Image (tube, helix red, strand yellow):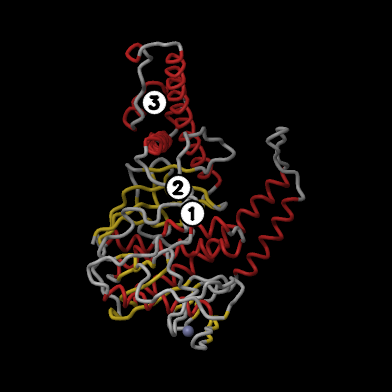
Amino acid sequence: MKTVQAYRFALDLTPGQERGVLAHAGAARVAHNWALARVKAVMDQRAAERTYGVTEELLTPAVSWSLPALRKAWNAAKTDVAPWWRECSKEAFNTGLDALARALKNWSDSRTGKRAGRPVGFPRFKSRRRSTPAVRFTTGTIRVEPDRQHVVLPRLGRLKLHESGRKLARRIDNGTARIMSATVRRDGGRWHVSFCVEVERAERRPTRPESTIGVDVGITNLAVLSTGETEPNPRHLTAARQRLRHLGRALSRKTGPDRRTGRRPSNRWQRASARLGRAHARVANLRRDSLHKLTTRLAHEHGAIVVEDLNVTGMLANRRLARHIADAGLGELRRQLVYKTQWSGGRLIVADRWYPSSKTCSGCGTVKTKLALSERTYHCQTCGLTIDRDHNAALNLAALAAQYDTAGSGPVAARRADQKTRQRGQVAVKREPGTATADQTGTVPPQGRDYRPCAH
Ligand SMILES: [Zn+2]
């Protein structure tokens, strides 16, 4: 099975190398901003001419937005715009032009309705202070050194890896991987190199193909499984969150930037802001690491995994941090499970967005009309079942897989989703095309259990 995946490693750059990467990132920004200004000028000119009543054929000719056209225009102008262009790899300018070509396409597709999802705005100029420095290499010498502690990139040369590159090097050595591009980027206050790699993966089977598991992403725990197993939050997360609050307060006491008066931030504010950024990155890393460990274990072991769909409207309604974190975790859990079940040969089943996994009794199927988020234990008034809230939800999800298997070919009518979906414009698309193949992922409409509110 051929897949395209990313291998990302932290880098330890010397000050000289850091200057080199920043110069390349700056070159990308210059090319991006120059090309954007050019496209914008022509668009504005044409719009102005139209208001004077100039006929379409006499208008200033439109400029092409495609990457080859932008590159051609840049090469013709670079000696005037950037006389220093020889100092940087051509890939640097290409990075900026490619980003612009894609941004313009997204904007135009969004406007003409070709692109689903939230409306995309017109590209903006990149600022040295606010944009993430990045440069992408698609040609030239890109390799992991035999010592697996260094990578070689065009112009930048030999860069030291902060962690071992053996996972990628092993695949390249045995011929199951081919590097397509490498991107150097600063995120979370640290430099990373990210390789886009085409990997030939061996076909796999889960160790227990007949096993089905329901996963409920919780607030107090990372996840609760239908086996009753709870996956606790990473150990250092609480400490990291406390530090986050502490640093946030420290930052707010310092003189920050003010766009209205044009005040520049103080050096102390910038240092505090960098500290806060690193703390944020650490929290994200802790969560991502434990989510990866959980999803890898689940995908390797179980034949079918059932998760709930993202509650988009719920996320919009409830801005509380805890709920947000849980929902963000759910989105990431699902994203990882989609590709990991494909790699391991398992199945991922996504429950319908309106399936009441928390409100349904896993013992008798009674559905409660109301269940506050603060009620951590589920009490069933009908059959007297008392069970942990998240475990109950996970059991319901696992039970859905059985219905999915016996449902046959005919789709079963779900409750009308549009009755609950009010904010049409704001609700994100439920499933993006291309995230899963048809035979491995499916939606299960709520069925088999009728809607009976509990008697009080
Ligand atoms: Zn019950």
Instruction: Locate residue 404, reporting x and y percent.
Output: 30, 73
Q: Which quarter of the rendered picture does the C terminus lie within?
A: bottom right
**Residue farthest to the bottom, as pictured:** 384
| Label 2 sits on residue | 184
Relative to residue 435, is residue 185 drawn left or right?
right
Q: Nearer the viewer, residue 136 or 19?
A: 136
Callout 3, which amino acid? Trp
Q: Position of residue 368 (x, y in %)?
A: 51, 75
Q: Which residue is mark 3?
A: 74
Q: Which label sits in the foreground, 3 or 2? A: 3
Image mark for residue 11: 1
Percent x, y of residue 166? 38, 63
The amino acid beneath tag 2 is: Val
Crowdedness of circle 3 by 10 Å Cα count: few (<14), some, many (20+)? many
Pick whichever, 340 or 186, lies toward us: 340
Residue 305: image quadrant is: bottom left
Q: Foreground: 448 or 362? A: 448
Sequence-wise, the earlier of marks 3 and 1 is 1
Label 1 sits on what residue type? Answer: Leu
Measured Cα–Cα span from mark 3 to mark 2: 23 Å
* Residue 7 sits above or below residue 326 on the image: above
